[in-house]
C-alpha cells in the first residue's frame, strides 16, 4: 500500500480575489425584505474583497422562478465570469413552494454545468420568514455574501484549471 504525504500532492483552490472578474448578481424582487439584505451582503463582501463597481452588474427579476432563464441568457452571452443568484422562497400552505424552490435550483444548477460558468445559488428556501431573515444578515450570517464569495472562488479556480496545460 502506498502512502502519500500531504505536501507531495498538488492541491488547487480558487482565491477570494474578485479583481478582474466580471460578476453578475441576479436577484429576485419577491420577498424583497430578505432579498434586499442578501444583495447588500453580496455587494459588501465583493467590495471588501476588492471588486470594482465597473465589474459588477445587478439584474432584478420578479421571483426565484425567473432566475434560471436570465442566468441562462447571461451564460449564453458569455460576458460574465461568474453569476450570483439571490432569492427567497418561504414555505406556505400549498405545494407551490416545492415547485418554485425545486425548479429554481434545478435550472440554476443546469446552467452552471452546461455553460461552465460558475453560478452560485444564494436562493434561500426556508420554512418561515424569521429563518430567512436569520440567513440574510441576522444571527446566521448573510448567505448573499457567502454566495458572492463562492462565485469568486469558483471563477478563479476555473481560470486556474483552464490556464494549466496538461
Image: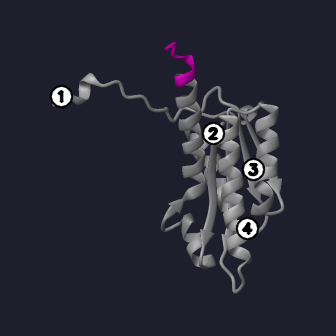
Q: What element carries label 1?
A: loop
**Residue count near mark 1 (Cα–Cα under 10 Å), binned few <14, some 14–19, many ≥20:** few
**Which x, y percent locates residue 51?**
63, 34
Q: Is there a contact, CB below 8 Å, between mark 2 and mark 1?
A: no
Q: Is mark 3 on a helix, strand or loop?
A: strand
Q: Residues in magenta?
A: 161-166
- Residue linked to disc 1: 2
Mark in the foreground, 2 or 3: 2
**Residue count near mark 3 (Cα–Cα under 10 Å), binned few <14, some 14–19, many ≥20:** many
**Residue count near mark 4 (Cα–Cα under 10 Å), binned few <14, some 14–19, many ≥20:** some
Upstream in the sequence, badge 3 or badge 1? 1
Q: Is there a contact, CB below 8 Å, between mark 4 and mark 3?
A: no
Upstream in the sequence, badge 2 or badge 1? 1
Report the disc number at residue 131. Answer: none
Q: How far apart are marks 3 and 1 (CA)?
A: 47 Å
Q: Distance between the residues labelled 2 and 1?
A: 35 Å
Amino acid at each position: 500500500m502506498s502512502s502519500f504525504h500531504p505536501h507531495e500532492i498538488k492541491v488547487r483552490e480558487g482565491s477570494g480575489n474578485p479583481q478582474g472578474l466580471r460578476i453578475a448578481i441576479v436577484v429576485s424582487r419577491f420577498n424583497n425584505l430578505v432579498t434586499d439584505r442578501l444583495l447588500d451582503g453580496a455587494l459588501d463582501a465583493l467590495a471588501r474583497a476588492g471588486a470594482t463597481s465597473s465589474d459588477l452588474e445587478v439584474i432584478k427579476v420578479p421571483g426565484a422562478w425567473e432566475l434560471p432563464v436570465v442566468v441562462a441568457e447571461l451564460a449564453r452571452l458569455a460576458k460574465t465570469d461568474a453569476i450570483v443568484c439571490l432569492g427567497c422562497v418561504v414555505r406556505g400552505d400549498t405545494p407551490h413552494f416545492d415547485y418554485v424552490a425545486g425548479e429554481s435550483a434545478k435550472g440554476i444548477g443546469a446552467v452552471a454545468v452546461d455553460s461552465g460558468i460558475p453560478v452560485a445559488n444564494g436562493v434561500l428556501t426556508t420554512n418561515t420568514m424569521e429563518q430567512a431573515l436569520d440567513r440574510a444578515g441576522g444571527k446566521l450570517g448573510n448567505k448573499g455574501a457567502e454566495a458572492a464569495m463562492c462565485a469568486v472562488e469558483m471563477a478563479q479556480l476555473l481560470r486556474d484549471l483552464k490556464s494549466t496545460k496538461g
